[in-house]
Amino acid sequence: MPFDSAALVWFRRDLRAHDHAALHAALKAHGRVHCAFVFDTEILDALPTRTDRRVEFIWESVRELADTLAGLGGALHVLHGKAREEIPRLAARLRVHAVYANHDYEPQAIARDAAVVATLQAMGIALHTRKDQVIFEKSEVLTQSGTPFSVFTPYKNAWLAKLEPFYVKPYPVEGFAGQLSPDALAPMPTLESLGFARTNLAELAIPTGASGARALLDEFSGRMGEYHQRRDFPALKGPSYLSVHLRFGTVSIRELVSRAWRSRTAGAAVWLSELVWRDFYFMILAHHPRVERQAFRPEYEAIRWDDRDDWYAAWCEARTGYPIVDAAMRQLNRSGYMHNRLRMIVASFLTKDLGLDWRRGEAYFAQHLNDFDLAANNGGWQWAASTGCDAQPWFRIFNPVAQSERFDAGGRFIRRYLPELARVPDKFIHAPWKMGPIEQQAAGCMIGRDYPAPLVDHAEARLRTLERYAVVKKKKPD
């Protein structure tokens, strides 16, 4: 390809203008590089609401990306339509020789990209894609027999053994700024013109764009060493809060892994494991796309889940009567975020206390999580339901009260999201139904009026779960 040729870089889940694999590759090979992002109506039109924090997050991040490219002497074509049609149309209009993008691993994205490849090929234009979302993808980390891993720990060990500086080396962009095309076809559309309204994103103070990711990363770096001690306690500032930025690529996974790898602290090692989990679930989805709708372990499809729409509604609406579960669901419903420990607790409660299909919970998270990622969300839900790879053993069932007592001992998190329990003594905050009438009156919280009674009895639900899962294992554990 002659260097004086033109290329188009298609931004998707990579909303930054630094350490960007596809943009770097295009700038190295072409003398003129155009940039584009498409607000894809095939994705947007499927959303159930016009007030979606993720759309606003993307819009703010795209706006910052356009400003950053302008500062480098370039521009961003921001389009609204079907990406599979808009990208080939733009490529033809700009008379580019090639289109560049970073890999996307979800089944719908793979189908979209295949359609774009076919259209571009008919026009004599190539689509070149690069690895950018993960450190190791697809079949880059395999067992000694050459098969995909299905258990995390040996995968992690192989992943770490393979890691070397080359894999976290950044892909620079700044030195090629003179090759960026400064022309954009039209001004960026407003959020309203896309058909969406403002949310409470600003009120929640969720930082957007690459600058927001940078601020979060710099702040977290100062407490990364304590991550292993604080990460399980939702009332503490333990996580990095970078998950939504990883989801939309406003931060580079290479930079995150590099920082954790260089830190050499116990906290950094545990955080690095969380990043390895992310690669692991991407790998599972790549090799087993059926997990999108089916259990990773086919034999678990024999499980018969309860059909209780009323229980599902109570779970969604934070009315289960278990404070840690309800507080977690209120956090999700109000902010689009849920602490990782709480994700495990509420998923276990839905599947093993209420006996409801994990797919229902997965779908609810997919609709509400700011950081929703198909691979990680599916992997986490199948882990909790014991249907997935390296899953929680089916006979180990989280006790929501014990989890609450252990990870929110003083009830700080619970009281933040359940103010109706504010005056409940610590002794009862995890199981307020144990208060007597006089204690309830003193706390200003009458069970059944001010706060619901428990939807189910955990001990009884546990026995039902053991019976439910016995159809898979043929016998109960000793």
Image: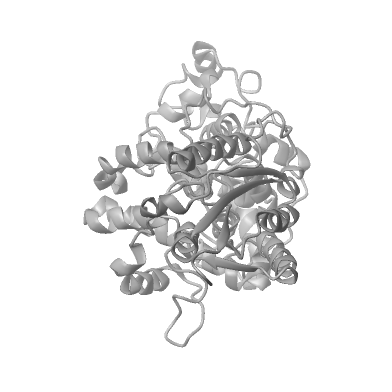
Residue furthest out toward the bottom: 145
* Figure check: 200 above or below 344: above
Across and down, in percent, residue 106 comes to: 63, 61
To which quarter of the image does residue 231 belong?
A: top left
To which quarter of the image does residue 298 belong?
A: bottom right
Residue furthest out toward the left: 264
Instruction: Please tell me which residue lies in front, 463 or 132.
Output: 132
Residue 476 visible in this rendered orientation of the protein? no
Across and down, in percent, residue 129 comes to: 55, 66
Apparent side of residue 30 relative to residue 294 in the rendered image (left or right): left
Instruction: Please tell me which residue lies in front, 342 or 110.
Output: 110
Residue 135 visible in this rendered orientation of the protein? yes
Across and down, in percent, residue 246 comes to: 47, 49
Apparent side of residue 465 relative to residue 139 in the rendered image (left or right): right
Residue at x 65% of width, y 42% of height = 185
Residue at x 25% of width, y 40% of height = 222
Instruction: Please tell me which residue lies in front, 324 or 116.
Output: 116
Q: What is the image's colouring?
A: one colour
Residue at x 64% of width, y 63% of height = 469
Apparent side of residue 194 relative to residue 177 in the rendered image (left or right): right
* Figure check: 164 above or below 337: below
Residue furthest out toward the front: 4
* Figure check: 122 above or below 334: below
How many marks can you see?
A: 0
Residue at x 37% of width, y 40% of height = 214
Instruction: Please tell me which residue lies in front, 180 or 400.
Output: 180
Across and down, in percent, residue 295 comes to: 65, 65
